[in-house]
Amino acid sequence: MFPVSSISSGKVSSGTLILTISAPVAKHSTITKENLYKIPLILPHRSIVRDEVSDILKLDQMRLNIRATTSLPGNTVSLLRNSNYYGLTIKGVYNNFHDPNLVFVPLVPNKSTGDVLAWRKNTILSPAIEKFLQFVNEQIQES
C-alpha cells in the first residue's frame, strides 16, 4: 500500500427512475419494486450495478421487463422522452440531462453511498490534474 490523498463527494442516492413527466408513475413520490415489475426498463449495462440495485430492493431480476441496457445514460434520453421506457439510474445522471420533460422519482428502500477520488500522496501532479481536482472540489462544495 502507498499513502493516498482523496476527495469525497459525500452521500449520493443509490437509485432513481427517470421518466417523462407525462408517465403515470411520474406523480408517485417514490418507486417500489412492485412498480418496477410493471414497466419497461432501461438498466445500466454493468451487472454489478444491476445486482446492487436488486439487492437493495430485493428484486427478482427475472420478473423485470428489461428492454435495453446502456453504458452511456445520456444516449437513452430520446428513448425516455419519446417512448414508454423508464431509466434506472442515480440522480446525478438525471441532473446532467437538463430536460424539463423528464423527471426522477427515487426508489424505496433507498441506500446512500459515497464516491471517492483517490491518488498517490506526495506525487507531483501536472497542471491539468491540479485544475481537474480544483474543479471537482468546487463542484462538491456547490452541491
Image: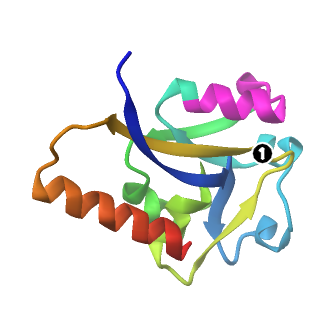
Could you tell me what secondary structure mostly forms the magenta stretch? helix
**In front here: 11 or 62?**
11
Extent of the magenta region:
49-63
Q: Quadrant of the C terminus?
A: bottom right
Q: Position of residue 27 (x, y in %)?
A: 83, 74
Residue name at image x 82 percent, y 35 percent: 57
- Which residue shows up at 71% across the image and 26% down it? 61
Q: Quadrant of the N terminus?
A: top left
Secondary element at tag 1? helix
User: How many labels, in total?
Assistant: 1
Work out whether 29 lies above or below 64: below
**Residue under numbered circle 1:** 36
Identify the residue shown where x is 37% and y is 48%: 72
Does residue 135 appear left or right of residue 67 in this picture? left
Q: Position of residue 129 (x, y in %)?
A: 19, 53
Residue 123 on image: x %, y %: 20, 37
Q: Is residue 86 visible?
A: no
In the rendered image, residue 100 lying in the magenta stretch gets the answer no
Q: Position of residue 9 (x, y in %)?
A: 54, 54
Identify the residue shown where x is 50% and y is 59%.
93
Amino acid marked by disc 1: Leu
Question: Callout 1 environment at 10 Å: few (<14), some (14 to 19), or many (20+)?
Answer: some
